[in-house]
Amino acid sequence: MAAKVLVIEDSRVMGEVMVFNLRHHGYQAQLAVNGSQALEMMQAQDFQVVLLDYQIPRMNGEEICQAMRQLPGYAQTPVIICSAKGYELDATRLREELGIANVLPKPFSPLELMALVNELTASATPASY
């Protein structure tokens, strides 16, 4: 079964492009446009990878990630932060405090994003899907 990826992105165009690329590469992908919607979706189903915009309405990326880590089954879920502020964020601190797998500065190549998602899903055990 294909890995499920949650894209949390307030720019609907950017989010839809990311979802399209993920689906094109065989992933089950869904889009949330704010932090509240994302947490509701995570409570309703299991995602193997989360792609998270840092600047998003209702909660910022760190707040979403902190709340996500408290949900059953999400303590170790890989998160990639995709942000225009990617170079300004302290990636080391985010990895240590929130378990962020990677920070991907915008704009990024869809191929670069797919390579990161492929790497993260390849390291997960198939039984967890």
Image (spheres, grey):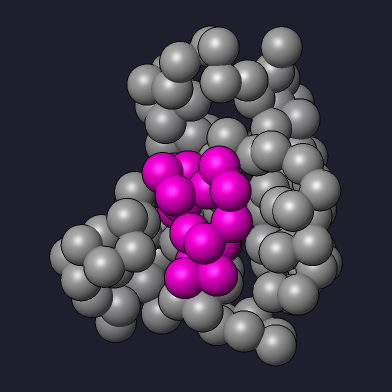
Identify the magenta region.
65-80
Judge whether residue 121 can be spotted in this image: yes
Image vertical order of residue 5 relative to residue 36, above or below: above
Q: Say which residue appears at 65% left-offset and 39% top-offset.
A: 47
The answer to which of 59 and 15 lies nearer the viewer is 59
Q: Give how far across and how far down residue 38 sits, in percent.
A: 73, 63
Q: Give how far across and how far down residue 81 sits, in percent.
A: 46, 61
Image vertical order of residue 82 relative to residue 63, above or below: above
Query: Quarter holding the N terminus?
Result: top right
Q: Give how far across and how far down residue 17 sits, in percent.
A: 74, 50
Q: Say which residue appears at 69% left-offset and 32% top-offset.
A: 4
Residue 56, quarter of picture: bottom right
Q: How many marks?
A: 0
The answer to which of 16 and 92 lies nearer the viewer is 92
Image vertical order of residue 55 relative to residue 76, above or below: below
Residue 44 magenta = no
The single residue placed furthest to the bottom in the displayed view is 58
| Left or right side of 58 for 53 | left
The answer to which of 28 and 40 lies nearer the viewer is 40
Judge whether residue 84 can be spotted in this image: no
Query: Quarter holding the C terminus?
Result: top right
Q: Say which residue appears at 20% left-offset and 62% top-offset.
A: 96
Q: Give how far across and how far down residue 28 sits, in percent.
A: 76, 30
| Left or right side of 23 for 52 | left
